[in-house]
Image: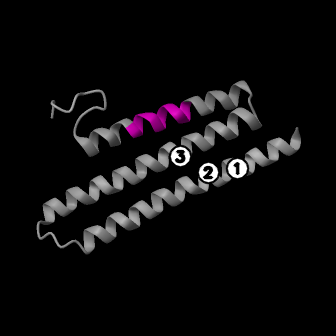
Amino acid sequence: MENIKLYIKLIADIVEMIGVITIFLGIIYGFFNFLFSKNQSVKNNYHILRQSLGKAILLGLEILIAADIMATVVIDPTLETVSVLGLIVLIRTLMSLSLEVEISGKFPWQSKKQS
């Protein structure tokens, strides 16, 4: 059983690393597009940069949540760790929701007609 926990911890660490790399590459991609865009409108470029950064952070947060769930539920499923995981997931979900609103300008449950 200890071997399984060790492998799952390793997998969770790899998934966390993928989440961090996703955010990092998204930031690099967003700034690269911002700096070398052929569009002359600075305001439009800034809006595109914010959307690009928001999408990268949003995707990275989702991956990090998955890694936290794997690590907590399998490796150390005590009441304290599961409670901390619940709080982390709640905070990250609220961050994801606010980023989604920032990116699209509407809540995810609103139809496309309401802008």
Position of 75 with respect to 97 (left or right) is right
Task: Name the residue that disc number 1 marks.
Answer: 11
Q: Secondary structure at mark 3?
A: helix
**As drawn, 112 above or below 12:** above
Q: Is residue 107 above or below residue 57?
A: above
Q: Main secondary structure of the magenta part?
A: helix
| C-alpha distance separating marks 2 and 3 | 7 Å
- At mark 1, the secondary structure is helix
Per the model, the C-alpha gap separating discs 1 and 3 is 12 Å
Which residue is at 68% across, 32% downward? 81
Instruction: Answer with the quarter of the image where residue 43 lies.
Output: bottom left
The label shown at residue 63 is: 3
**Quadrant housing residue 75:** top right
Q: Does 90 sit left or right of 45 as displayed? A: right
Residue at the spot of label 2: 15
**Pointers 2 and 1 in contact (C-beta within 8 Å):** yes
Residue under the image location 54 percent in, 53 percent down: 19
* Position of residue 41 measured from the top left corner of the image (x, y, whole percent): 11, 66
* The one of 93 and 48 positioned closer to us in this rendering: 48
Image location of residue 25, percent across then percent down: 45, 64
Of the residues shown, which amino acid type is indicated by label 1?
Ile
Amino acid type of disc 2?
Answer: Val
For the magenta stretch, what is the residue range? 87-96
Q: Is residue 114 magenta?
A: no
Q: Do tag 2 and tag 3 residues touch (Cβ < 8 Å)?
A: yes
Which quadrant of the figure contains the C terminus? top left
Outermost residue, front direction? 112
Q: Residue furthest top?
A: 79
